Amino acid sequence: MSKLAERITQQFGSVLDGKVGARVFQSNGLDIVETPREKLIEMLTFLKDDPECDCDYFIDGFGVDYLELEDASSERFGVCYQVMSKAKKHRIVIRTFVPETDAKCPSATAVYYGALWPEREAFEMYGVIFVGNPDGRRLLMPEDYDEGYPLRKDFPLRGKGWRDSFEVYEGYEPKIPTEFNRPPPGKY
């Protein structure tokens, strides 16, 4: 376990009991902390403000659907944030689980504003609502899209039938402008 993981265990030991959803472990050399969603913002704030952690850089945030994973918690969705310290050169992933029946998670944008777009994407793709996210507009899908959440594992691979209504273009050949002056084949 790294010094960063030890520091988190020292600070949040009463919450991290070692069970799935409340533990610290390593995977592929990366420290991962699973925390209850009620403690998510407190933990992210600690990582940013504590001088020993100094996690001042938000790397990424994303959602995960654990529908068919037997080793996951009993909750269907996971929300992960990866942060790092530029000065101390360490990084960590903070993960919390969100039930399908109450797919709400506190927004990390008050701590790391860079979480804004990843949270919007996780909402659109998985349906997890980030309470406190200041921008609820759609990011990837049309504003009037109401067919479900495309990255959920129970979403049909071919969509819900609306692709069949698109016009099909047969025999389309793109026109390449002549000003590109490409050399003849084989003479590069």
Image (tube, rainbow, N blue to C red):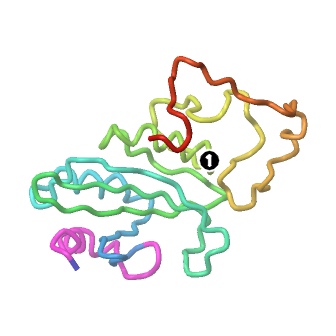
Residue at x-position 67% and y-position 56%: 152
> Label 1 crowding class (10 Å Cα cut-off): few <14, some 14-19, many 20+?
many
Quarter of the picture containing the N terminus is: bottom left
Picture layout, residue 154 above or below residue 127: below
- Across and down, in percent, residue 82 comes to 34, 56
Q: Is residue 11 magenta?
A: yes
In-front residue for pair 126/43: 126
Task: Name the kind of residue labelled 1 in the image.
Answer: Met
Marks counted in the figure total 1
Quadrant in the picture for residue 44: bottom left
Residue at numbered disc 1: 125
In-front residue for pair 98/180: 180
- Across and down, in percent, residue 145 comes to 73, 33
Residue at x-position 32% and y-position 50%: 59
Quadrant in the picture for residue 53: bottom left
Residue at x-position 44% and y-position 81%: 19
- Across and down, in percent, residue 56 comes to 20, 48
Picture layout, residue 65 above or below residue 128: below
Q: Which residues are magenta?
A: 2-21
